[in-house]
Amino acid sequence: VKRLLLDCDPGLDDALAILLAHGDPDLELVAVTTVGGNVVLENTTRNALELREYLGFPDVPVASGAAGPLVRETKNAAEVHGVGGIGDVILPKAALPLDARGAVELIVETLRDAPGEIHLVATGPMTNIALALRAEPRVAEWAASFTIMGGSFTRGNTTPAAEFNIYADPEAAAEVFAADWQVVMVGLDLTLQALVTDTVKGRMLALGPLGRDLVVPLATFWNDPQDPDWGGQAVHDVCAVAYLARPDLFTSVPARVEVETAGEWTAGMTVTDFRSSIPNALVPVRLDVPGFWDYVLGVYARVAAS
Ligand code: BDR
Ligand code: CA
């Protein structure tokens, strides 16, 4: 069983990633930390708290972190995720409190208390992770692995060059890639293979109430009216958690990734050199799509049946 701490900004696909981390018996979700990103911190945190009780993992601490990026102005993606962050899903209000610690403290303490055992997964802007590394550089050493959803090597989604999580806080991402660990960069080139097609949506609906009330609304809220080849919403963040559990579903290549922080047109671009002799990242490039959906929907079916 792999134990993980998920730093996230729920977020439609973050919520689906939480569901996967919670439901997979080969994973143990030990903490959730939130960051401002898709929507304001207040809402990403509320969503994490409500999901904890709705899905039923009351003993897992939830802590809230940075409201905005290290140096730039706050950007969000409310047009994709809805102002509340999880589309039109309305969950019962949470009764349990936030952890008394902030996200940075919770990250540092959780990793320090079990060095080499906790896998860190980040599916929002990298602000909390950068602050944790500033507070305690040994976080990079203590993490059993570090996987992000973020970046890309061919294209962006927020600008032509940059993916949202990196664009939202390029300085934080640059610090995170410069730290003394290998970053598994699950970027857009990979996640855009994980699309909720009509067939996948049908399988989600077959999950019963969990499918109808949570999974399908989260997985189909957004569609891009400007995309003539629209093939379904991508479940970006789910891919990062899936990578941790099932790396065999991914074909991955080492690379050196540098984050552009100075570019006029390219801020937040993850410049990826697959020919570098000093790689700092592992980049999943190809997904076994049928295997991925069998895995994810299999886990969701277990949760639906429980
Ligand atoms: C990433 O940005 C957010 O909108 C999603 O939750 C995902 O983490 C995709 O670019
Ligand atoms: Ca996210």
Image (tube, rainbow, N blue to C red):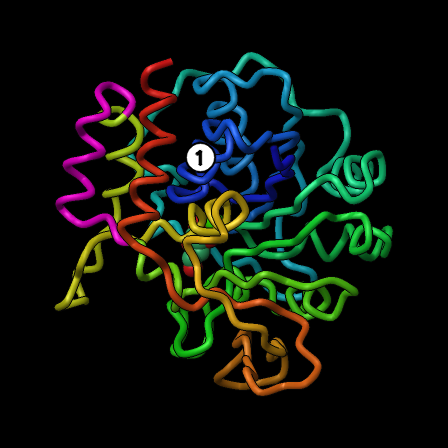
User: In front: 209, or 42?
Assistant: 209
267 lies left or right of 209: right
**Residue found at x 31% / y 25%:** 301
Q: Residue at x 63, y 57 (%)?
A: 126
In this rendering, the answer to whether 204 lies above or below 193 is: above
- Across and down, in percent, residue 86 comes to 37, 37
Residue type at mark 1?
Leu
Give the answer, above or below, for where 267 lies relative to 92: below
Image quadrant occupied by the C terminus: top left
Extent of the magenta region: 195-210
Can you give x and y, in whole percent of width and height, for residue 260 in the image? 60, 80
Say if residue 38 shows up in the picture.
no
Residue extending furthest toward the front: 248
Q: Can residue 244 be seen in this view?
A: yes
Q: Which residue is drawn at 45% across and 42% down?
A: 14
In the rendered image, which quarter contains the N terminus? top right
- Look at 32% across and 48% down and name the residue there: 291
Task: Please name the residue that numbered disc 1 is placed on.
Answer: 20
Indicate the position of residue 289 as horizontal and vertical percent values.
Answer: 29, 54
Give the side of residue 105 with respect to residue 253, left or right. right
Mark 1, ligand 2, within 8 Å: the answer is no
Camera-nearest residue between 65 and 201: 201
Magenta: main secondary structure: helix
Question: Which quadrant of the figure has residue 258?
Answer: bottom right
- Above or below, comparing residue 280 to residue 106 in the picture: below
